[in-house]
Image (cartoon, helix red, strand yellow):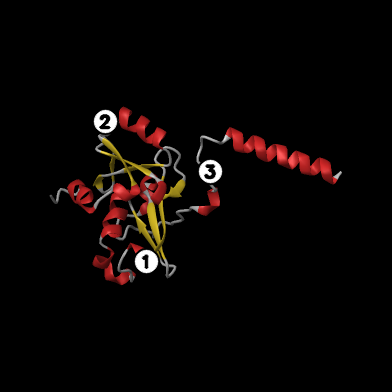
Amino acid sequence: MKKIALIVLMLSTSLLSQTNANKPFVIQSEYRIDFDKNTSCLIRNIPLYKNPKWGAKIVTRAGKTVYFCSPKSLFEFYHRPGKWFEVGVKSERDFNQVVVTDYKTLQAINGEKAFFVYGSNQTSPAGDDLVAFATQENAEKFAKENNGKRIFKFDKVSDALIRLLNGRI
């Protein structure tokens, strides 16, 4: 009986890995953006519940959670955390987790592995913004349908790009 159970387990694991070979594996409980009506963006003081599809957060190594109303706001903090000294971080080394909302699925995803569409006709509560996606395929499709100009990985989103989006260049 144990041999049969072991064989069934091995076969189901093998089939699962083959059907999801081209899809990113996402553990739903690993990334969450939990907020209520009192949760607002650190940068713009905009309540997150009004536009949840743009929500984002950073969890610090000290365990503090900082919320943002959009990916652009998250990157503003990410590139210049010392500007908000009350949070108690000095650089990105003080960050434990970066989470954004996938614009298509509305699921919380790892922001450091996300794809961000620049220049689309969709605006966030923060104005011109970057639209986040878990997969490059969804980002490309969105860019084609919404006049997106470029797609960036997390580490390619520069402070200069965020300043450009804010009209500060």
User: Is 49 placed left or right of 3 in the picture?
Assistant: left
- Mark 1 and mark 2 in contact? Answer it, CB < 8 Å: no
Amino acid residing under circle 1 = Asp
At mark 1, the secondary structure is: helix
Whole-angstrom CA distance, mark 1 to mark 2, is 35 Å
Q: How many marks?
A: 3
Q: Residues within 10 Å of mark 1 (few under 14, many from 20)?
A: some
Q: Residue at x 42, y 38 (%)?
A: 135
Q: Quick check: can you spot residue 166?
A: yes
Amino acid residing under circle 2 = Asn
In terms of depth relative to the viewer, which is nearer, 32 or 61?
61
Q: What is the residue that sits farthest to the right in this orientation? A: 1
Give the mark toward the camera: 1 or 2: 1
Tell me which label, 1 or 2, sits earlier in the chain: 1
* Residue 94: mark: 1
Q: Residue at x 45, y 54 (%)?
A: 33
Residue 20 to residue 37: above or below: above
Residue 117 to residue 68: above or below: above
Occupied quadrant, residue 134? top left
Amino acid residing under circle 3 = Phe
| Residue placed under numbered mark 3 in the picture | 25
* Residue 147: mark: 2
Q: Position of residue 52 (x, y in %)?
A: 39, 47
Q: Residues within 10 Å of mark 3 (few under 14, many from 20)?
A: few
